[in-house]
Amino acid sequence: MKASPTSRGELGRRAEQAAQRYLVERGLRPLGHNLHNRYGEIDLLMRDGETLVFVEVRYRRRADFGGALASVDARKRGKLLRAAAAHLQQHGLDQSPCRFDAVGVAPAGKEPFGRIEWVADAFRAD
């Protein structure tokens, strides 16, 4: 059964596609998406020059409670850090420079994915 275009999963998938297109237009190269391991999911894995970029994509229909980017809270950052560390170790990339970006996607006018906000180096693994 095909998901309706307004289902949560479909909206998330389309938001990730919009975010990836946006980042590619700005020079990043896609390496993978929806990468799962026991610690969580990496929405997008991209390369910016020599740097691996782990991208968390958040979609919100409304800006209540701070909007999409505000939803990348400490718990979510921790999950992403653990998932990224596992991915790096599993693929022998422990020494690769990396960063964590966040992309917020929201409607703009009649475009359901028309507003994209990218925060490069949104948080660090300290």
Image (cartoon, rainbow, N blue to C red):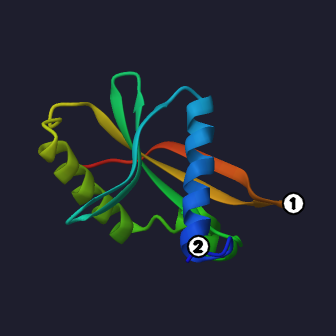
Q: Nearer the viewer, residue 64 or 12?
A: 12
Q: Position of residue 87 (x, y in %)?
A: 21, 48
The residue lying at 73 percent from left, 53 percent from top is: 115
Q: CA distance from mark 1 to mark 2?
A: 27 Å
Q: Position of residue 19 (x, y in %)?
A: 58, 47
Q: Residues within 10 Å of mark 2 (few under 14, many from 20)?
A: few
Secondary structure beneath dot 1 equals: loop
Q: Which mark is residue 2?
A: 2
- Quarter of the view holding residue 62: bottom right
- Of all residues, the one furthest to the front in this rendering is 1
Left or right of 100? Residue 63 is right
Q: Which amino acid lies under the numbered mark 2 shown in the image of this protein?
A: Lys
Tag 1 residue: 109
Left or right of 81? Residue 116 is right
The residue lying at 34 percent from left, 29 percent from top is: 51
Q: Nearer the viewer, residue 108 or 14?
A: 14
Q: Position of residue 93 (x, y in %)?
A: 17, 35
Query: Which numbered disc, 1 or 2, marks the residue that appears first in the sequence?
Result: 2
